[in-house]
Image (spheres, grey):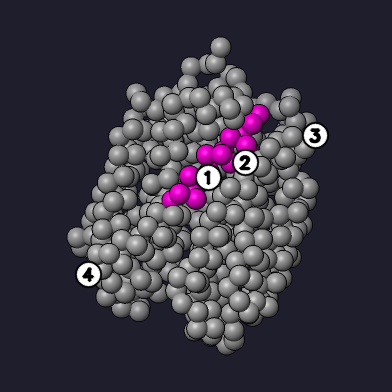
C-alpha cells in the first residue's frame, strides 16, 4: 500500500471505527434503560443492579493496558475480532440470566471486549493521523459518545413490547453482525508510514517513544491522570444517575426525554469539537478552556437546575464540554510519548475512568445517602474540574523533555 492509498485507507478505518464505537457504547450509555427494566421484572434492589455498572467500568478499563500490549506487539486485527465476539456473546448470554452473579459475569465478559475495542479503535486514530490527531481521535470517540442517541430509541421500543431479555438477545445479535466484519479491517500503519504534518507546533509528536515504565516517570502523566479522573466523572455521573438527577430537580417527562437525545449528541460532538480546536491552538490550552467552562456549568446546574428548561440547557452544555477528555488525552499521550507504544500507554492512562466510575457511582450514591441530595457530589466534581483546568495550563502541563 503506497502513501496515497494509506491516506485514503485511514479514513475508511475511521468510518468503521465510528460504527464500532457507536455499537459498543450500548454497554455504557444504554445501561440505565436496561437496569430499570431488570428492576421491574426481577425485583432486584438498586444496589444489586447498580453493581453491574461498576463491574462494567472496571472490566472495560483495566483490560486495556494488557490488550494494548498485545495489539502493539502483534497487531490489532485478531485482538479486535476476539473482542467483537466477546461483546456479542456478553449480551446474548445475559438474556438467560436468573441471578445477579450470572449478570455480573456475563456483562463483565462483554465489557472486557468493549474495553479492548475502545482502546484499539482510539489507538488507530493516534497512529494513522499524526497530522490531524485531535480531529481523528475526536471523530472516533464521537461514536462512543453519540451512538445511544440512535440505539436508545430502539431499546425503548423493544422494552415497550417485551422483556429486557429481548433487548439483550436482539442487540447482542446486532453487535455480532456489525462488529465482527468491521474488526477484520483493523490494522496499524507500517513502521515506514509517514505523513506531512501541518499542525500546531505544540502538538508535534515526541521524537522518542516512551515505554510505559518511562512514561510513568514523568510528572505530566500524573497531572493528566488526575484531570482525566475528575473531568470524565461528570459525564459518567450523568450517564449513570441522569434519571435520579432529573427526579431530584423535578424535571417533567417531556424535558427528560429531550435530555436523553441531547446528552449523547452533545457528548459526541464535544469530542470532535475539542479535538479540532486542540489541533489549532494546542491540547493544553483547549483543556484549560473546556474544563473551566465545564466546572462552571456544573455549578450552574446546582443553582439553577430546578427550572426544567435550565436543566436541559445546562446538561446539554455540560455534555458539549464533558466529552472532551476522551479526545484530548489519547492525542496528548501520542504527542507527548510517541506512537509506538500508544495503545499500551493510553490503556494505562484510561484506567482513570475506573476511578471516575467509582466517583460517579458508589461515592455519589454514598454522599446522596448521607446528605439527601446530588448537589454535594456535583459541587465536588465541578470544583475538581476547575482544578484540572488550572493544572492543565501549558506552562505546567508541557511536553516532557526528551529522555536521556
Q: Residue at x 59, y 86 (%)?
A: 162
Question: Observer-nearest residue: 286 or 39?
Answer: 39
Mark toward the start of the polypeptide (2 vs 1): 2
| Quadrant hosting residue 337 | top right
Q: Which residue is mark 1?
A: 351
Q: Secondary structure at mark 2?
A: helix
Q: CA distance from mark 3 to mark 2?
A: 29 Å
Q: Which residue is mark 2?
A: 65
Identity of the residue furthest to the left in this view: 303
Q: Is residue 268 magenta?
A: no
Mark toward the start of the polypeptide (4 vs 2): 2
User: How many neighbours does mark 2 have within 10 angstroms: few (below 14), some (14-19), or many (20 or more)?
Assistant: many
Q: CA distance from mark 4 to mark 3?
A: 57 Å
Disc assigned to residue 1: 3
Start and end of the magenta stretch? 340-356
Q: Residue at x 22, y 69 (%)?
A: 306
Q: CA distance from mark 2 to mark 1?
A: 8 Å
Q: Position of residue 217 (x, y in %)?
A: 51, 24
User: How many neighbours does mark 4 have within 10 angstroms: few (below 14), some (14-19), or many (20 or more)?
Assistant: some
Q: Nearer the viewer, mark 4 or mark 3?
A: 4
- Residue 241 visible, this angle: yes
Q: Quadrant of the N terminus?
A: top right
Mark toward the start of the polypeptide (4 vs 3): 3
Question: Observer-nearest residue: 239 or 137?
Answer: 239
Q: Which residue is mark 4?
A: 307
Identity of the residue furthest to the bottom in this view: 161
Q: Residue at x 61, y 26 (%)?
A: 211
Q: Residue at x 63, y 48 (%)?
A: 63
Mark toward the start of the polypeptide (3 vs 2): 3
Q: CA distance from mark 4 to mark 2?
A: 43 Å
Amino acid at each position: 500500500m503506497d502513501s496515497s492509498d494509506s491516506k485514503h485507507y485511514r479514513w475508511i478505518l475511521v468510518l468503521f471505527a465510528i460504527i464500532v464505537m457507536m455499537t459498543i457504547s450500548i454497554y455504557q450509555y444504554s445501561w440505565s434503560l436496561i437496569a430499570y427494566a431488570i428492576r421491574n421484572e426481577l425485583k432486584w434492589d438498586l444496589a444489586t443492579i447498580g453493581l453491574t455498572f461498576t463491574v462494567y467500568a472496571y472490566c472495560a478499563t483495566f483490560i486495556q493496558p494488557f490488550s494494548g500490549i498485545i495489539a502493539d506487539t502483534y497487531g490489532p486485527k485478531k485482538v479486535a475480532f476476539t473482542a467483537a465476539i466477546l461483546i456479542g456473546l456478553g449480551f446474548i448470554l445475559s438474556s438467560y440470566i436468573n441471578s445477579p452473579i450470572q449478570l455480573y459475569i456475563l456483562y463483565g465478559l462483554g465489557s472486557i471486549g468493549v474495553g479492548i475495542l475502545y482502546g484499539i479503535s482510539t489507538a488507530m486514530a493516534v497512529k494513522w493521523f499524526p497530522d490531524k490527531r485531535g480531529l481523528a481521535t475526536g471523530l472516533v470517540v464521537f461514536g462512543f459518545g453519540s451512538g445511544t442517541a440512535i440505539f436508545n430509541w430502539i431499546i425503548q421500543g423493544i422494552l415497550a413490547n417485551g422483556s429486557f431479555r429481548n433487548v439483550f438477545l436482539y442487540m447482542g445479535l446486532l453487535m455480532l453482525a456489525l462488529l465482527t466484519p468491521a474488526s477484520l479491517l483493523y490494522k496499524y500503519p507500517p513502521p515506514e508510514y509517514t505523513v506531512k504534518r501541518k499542525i500546531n507546533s505544540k502538538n508535534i509528536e515526541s521524537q522518542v517513544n516512551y515505554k510505559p515504565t518511562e512514561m510513568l516517570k514523568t510528572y505530566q502523566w500524573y497531572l493528566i491522570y488526575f484531570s482525566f479522573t475528575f473531568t470524565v466523572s461528570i459525564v459518567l455521573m450523568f450517564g449513570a444517575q441522569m434519571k435520579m438527577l432529573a427526579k431530584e430537580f423535578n424535571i417533567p417527562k417531556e424535558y427528560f426525554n429531550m435530555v436523553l437525545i441531547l446528552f449523547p449528541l452533545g457528548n459526541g460532538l464535544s469530542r470532535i469539537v475539542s479535538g479540532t480546536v486542540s489541533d489549532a491552538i494546542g491540547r493544553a490550552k483547549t483543556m484549560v478552556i473546556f474544563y473551566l467552562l465545564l466546572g462552571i456549568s456544573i455549578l450552574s446546574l446546582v443553582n439553577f437546575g430546578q427550572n426544567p428548561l435550565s436543566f436541559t440547557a445546562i446538561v446539554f452544555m455540560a455534555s458539549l464540554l464533558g466529552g472532551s477528555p476522551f479526545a484530548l488525552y489519547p492525542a496528548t499521550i501520542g504527542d507527548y510519548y510517541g506512537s509506538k507504544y500508544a495503545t499500551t500507554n493510553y490503556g494505562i492512562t484510561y484506567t482513570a475512568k475506573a476511578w471516575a466510575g467509582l466517583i460517579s457511582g458508589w461515592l455519589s450514591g454514598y454522599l446522596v445517602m448521607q446528605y439527601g441530595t446530588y448537589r454535594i457530589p456535583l459541587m465536588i466534581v465541578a470544583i475538581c474540574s476547575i482544578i484540572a483546568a488550572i493544572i492543565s495550563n501549558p506552562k505546567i502541563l508541557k511536553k516532557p523533555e526528551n529522555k536521556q
